[in-house]
Image (tube, helix red, strand yellow):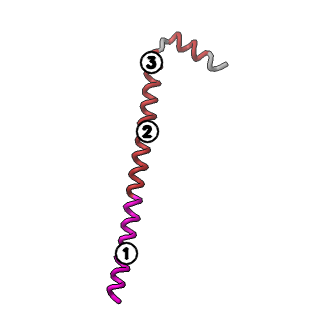
């Protein structure tokens, strides 16, 4: 009887540990996805800022003037 209880307790503990490992690995995967998305957003921001800096002010004003129409 005690062997059955020990086996049952071990099975419950093993299931709990497997569940927690799955949660941790899922959280790490989500963090990696978020970090990759943030990197893409930073790269796009840097590219836009670089493009804005290369446009001469007169041309930028002419281009932006068409936006408010």
Q: Which residue is mark 1?
A: 11
Q: How far from the left and from the top, in percent, is residue 6?
A: 33, 82
Rendering coords of residue 26 (x, y %): 42, 55
64 relative position to 12: left or right: right
CA–CA distance in space, label 3 to label 1: 63 Å
As drawn, the label of residue 38 is 2
Residue 37 appears left or right of 64: left
Give neighbour class at mark 2: few <14, some 14-19, many 20+ (Cα, 10 Å).
few
Front residue (pair 26, 39): 26
| Residue 61 left/right relative to 25 | right
Q: First in sequence, mark 3 or 1: give its number.
A: 1
User: Where, quadrant-wise, is the C terminus in this rendering?
Assistant: top right
Q: Which residues are magenta?
A: 1-23
Residue 53 vs 2, above or below: the answer is above
Q: Residue at x 45, y 24 (%)?
A: 49
| Disc 1 to disc 2, C-alpha distance | 41 Å
Look at the numbered disc 3 and give the secondary structure of its residue. Answer: helix
The tag earlier along the polypeptide, 1 or 2, is 1
Q: Secondary structure at mark 2?
A: helix
Viewed as shown, does residue 62 lie left or right of 8? right
Magenta segment includes 5: yes
Give the answer, above or below, for where 44 lies relative to 14: above
SS class of the residue under badge 1?
helix
Our reading of the magenta stretch's main secondary structure is helix
Instruction: Tell us which disc is closer to us: 1 or 2.
Output: 1
Q: Residue under circle 3? A: 53
């Amino acid at each position: 009887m005690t062997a059955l209880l020990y086996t049952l307790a071990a099975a419950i503990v093993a299931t709990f540990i497997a569940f927690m490992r799955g949660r941790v690995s899922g959280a790490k995967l989500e963090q990696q996805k978020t970090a990759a998305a943030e990197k893409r957003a930073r790269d796009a921001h840097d590219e836009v800022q670089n493009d804005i800096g290369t446009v001469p002010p007169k041309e930028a004003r002419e281009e932006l003037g068409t936006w408010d129409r």
